[in-house]
Image (cartoon, rainbow, N blue to C red):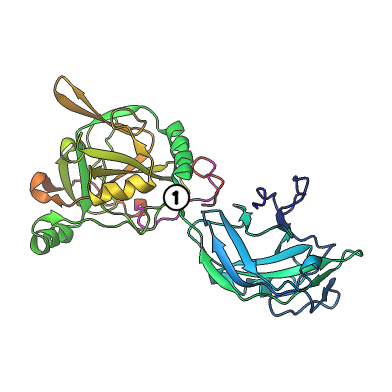
Amino acid sequence: MEVPRLDHPMSSPTSPCEDVIKNLSLEAIQLCDRDGNKSQDSGIAEMEELPVPHNIKISNITCDSFKISWDMDSKSKDRITHYFIDLNKKENKNSNKFKHKDVPTKLVAKAVPLPMTVRGHWFLSPRTEYTVAVQTASKQVDGDYMVSEWSEIIEFCTADYSKVHLTQLLEKAEVIAGRMLKFSVFYRNQHKEYFDYIREQHGNAMQPSVKDNSGSHGSPISGKLEGIFFSCHTEFNTGKPPQDSPYGRHRFEIAAEKLFNPNTNLYFGDFYCMYTAYHYVILVIAPVGSPGDEFCKQRLPQLNSKDNKFLTCIEEDGVMVYHHAQDVILEVIYTDPVDLSLGTVAEITGHQLMSSSTANAKKDPSCKTCNISVGR
């Protein structure tokens, strides 16, 4: 049986049966830690007869929910009225010692059939490791609780954003994408040493590498998708790529049709900002049927290459015409190797703007424009 979606820990439950998980009220209970240590005025009493949960199982994990179940002896099972769940980020196991001893941090649920769903984006973040332990409890007529010993502690990791969550990000990005500007080339800036290395060690072909952890914390492409980053932004007054770059003074340029054409698929990957007024959209271009295409097909929303708000490829009078969104900065990932002979490498005349780099940049979790309510 699933527990209805959680109310905020500080609000009262809305479900008639109150089968929800919420923070314990300070008036009702004073918390003990996993070792059973309680404050002197604790309202929790020990009751050895209550069964201790064991063999805990976590299943159906998403970016902001999971199902939990366990085994327990039938002895005194009918006296159980509540379950206490101690949920902590793995890297922060001992955080409670810095808090006031009476500040409740555990979750409580009415004793419902297992497995039950724990859901709540205010205490669960995507792609994050957690530890969890469970107690059984019996609420007494005076409001106090009798509790079992804590179960064993187990670990699990929440999932990435699903296609549903990414579609929510996509819809937010569409709102601010702005009008479309024409462009003709994709480009990639690096240091001279990078291109020398490609020529000498990789037979002139730039190789895909694993995407870093910049952008949304729940993005399924971070640390997993292999590709090569390109830009396509043009200056409004010239219609050409800018002469400044944060990534290096040497630029590889390639005609847009060499990377983006009817033989490729286009996917939406992410939408984020870095505590700035401007926003980034990550798009993925993958040759049809390639490993990158199969990876994206399972995880990312696919865009219509001819009709979307970010990057389009349309044939007009036998010629491919390309447009990009003006009001967001597009980061385009191409998932296959690219030979330098398909384009040109030259030194730019502008400056190297190191402060503009997005390498491993963390997303602003407070931005209302580019966040959704399932963690950051």
Q: Residue at left 10%, top 45%?
A: 342
Marker count (numbered): 1
**Element at label 1:** loop
Q: Main secondary structure of the magenta part?
A: loop
Q: Which residues are magenta?
A: 357-368
Q: Name the spot of residue 264 as percent of width and height, x first.
A: 22, 39
Q: Is residue 358 magenta?
A: yes
Would residue 185 appear left or right of 200 to someone viewing this image?
A: right
Q: Residue furthest front?
A: 74
257 within the magenta span? no
Residue 316 pos. (x, y %): 19, 21
* Relative to 276, residue 175 above or below: above
**Which residue sits at x=86%, y=74%?**
41
Query: In x, y percent, where is residue 353?
Result: 31, 51
Query: Does any portion of residue 77 appear in the rendered image?
Result: yes
209 to 334, vertically: above or below: below
Label 1, on which residue? 274
Query: Residue 1 appears at what percent x and percent y?
Result: 65, 53
